[in-house]
Image (tube, grey):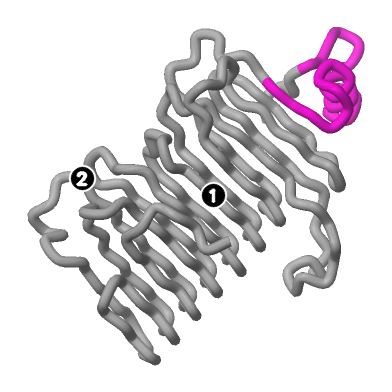
């Protein structure tokens, strides 16, 4: 794993000490890193993303900034890659029985980004409007996800592995999308196409998808429940 940002010679190889050093520099619960020579970014969660809000900021001078008020993560930054590792999340959090406040992560929208989440996600909001998004991948399943997508460049892949429940995806008006689901689905919707219940594999495409150059390809494995993909800029929350 990359060396934690904020280390000094006394803390090399000790991510806990490195994390504390960074917290002191940024004000306890705030994290940030300069853009430097980075021409692209990758946001990586290695142990899940629970109660997190991700946003894009075109006016930001640095690479990213973040605020965590309850569970302090360990963060590494190297070569434009921001790696965030949270402490293990109790299973109770997936059910919404904790009063924990959401963490916030803001990305510099002047460079393109890939977003990668491993370990699952719950109560995740990603407002990526204005961002140049290369890809969005989520491994480990998701419960309660809201995403506002930016205008794509080429075919942009959005992948959810491990099942999806209560997912709302918004894309800009006029942008086409494809939705593929493996493992069955209940209450699935792509624009005006609605599936009440179906097993096996599903492949839905919005009008003119095959002829479009800039489009979204959304793939879900492990089944989907209450998943919608619509045109529209605003999130429901």
User: Which of the 4 image quadrants contains residue 150?
Assistant: top left
Density class for disc 1 (Cα within 10 Å; few <14, some 14-19, many ≥20) is many
Look at the image and tell me whether residue 26 can be seen. yes
Q: Which residues are magenta?
A: 6-32
Instruction: Report the side of 16 relative to 177 (left or right).
Output: right
Query: In terms of secondary structure, where does tag 2 sit?
Result: loop
Verify whether residue 43 appears in magenta.
no
Find residue 39 and report its horizontal and vertical position in percent.
43, 17
Q: Quadrant of the N terminus?
A: top right
N-terminal-most mark, 2 or 1: 1
Number of residues whose C-alpha sits closer than 10 Å to that of mark 2, classed few (under 14), some (14–19) or many (20 or more): some
Residue 218 falls in image quadrant? bottom left
| Vertical side of 216 occupied by 111: above or below | above
Q: Position of residue 161 (x, y in %)?
A: 49, 63
Side of 114 where 101 appears, left or right: right
The correct choice, above or below, for 26 with respect to 219 in the image is above
12 in magenta: yes
- Judge whether residue 13 can be spotted in this image: no
In this picture, is 97 found above or below 183?
above
Where in the figure is residue 76, as x and y percent of width and height? 70, 27
Q: Nearer the viewer, residue 95 or 79?
A: 95
From the viewer's perspective, tell me whether residue 221 is left or right of residue 216.
Answer: right
In this figure, which residue is indicated by the disc labeled 2? 214
- Residue drawn at 39 percent across, 91 percent down: 197
Report helix, strand or loop for mark 1. Answer: strand
Residue at mark 2 to residue at mark 1: CA–CA distance: 20 Å
List the residue tagged with mark 1: 126
């Amino acid at each position: 794993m990359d060396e934690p940002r904020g280390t000094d010679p006394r803390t090399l190889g000790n991510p806990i000490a490195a994390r504390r050093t960074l917290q002191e520099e940024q004000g306890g619960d705030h994290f940030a890193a300069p853009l430097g020579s980075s021409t692209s970014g990758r946001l990586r969660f290695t142990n899940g993303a629970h109660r997190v809000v991700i946003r894009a900021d075109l006016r930001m001078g640095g690479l990213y900034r973040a605020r965590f008020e309850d569970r302090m993560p360990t963060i590494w930054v190297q070569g434009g890659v921001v790696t965030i590792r949270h402490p293990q999340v109790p299973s109770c959090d997936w059910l919404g029985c904790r009063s924990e406040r959401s963490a916030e992560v803001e990305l510099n929208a002047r460079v393109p980004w890939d977003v990668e989440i491993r370990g699952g996600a719950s109560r995740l909001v990603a407002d990526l409007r204005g961002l140049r998004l290369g890809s969005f991948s989520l491994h480990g399943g998701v419960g309660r996800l809201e995403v506002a997508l930016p205008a794509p460049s080429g075919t942009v892949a959005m992948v959810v592995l491990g099942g999806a429940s209560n997912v709302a995806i918004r894309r800009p008006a006029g942008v086409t999308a494809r939705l593929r689901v493996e493992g069955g689905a209940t209450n699935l919707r792509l624009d005006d196409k609605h599936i009440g219940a179906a097993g096996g594999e599903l492949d839905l495409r919005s009008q003119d998808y095959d002829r479009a150059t800039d489009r979204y390809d959304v793939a879900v494995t492990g089944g989907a429940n209450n998943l919608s993909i619509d045109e529209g800029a605003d999130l429901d929350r």
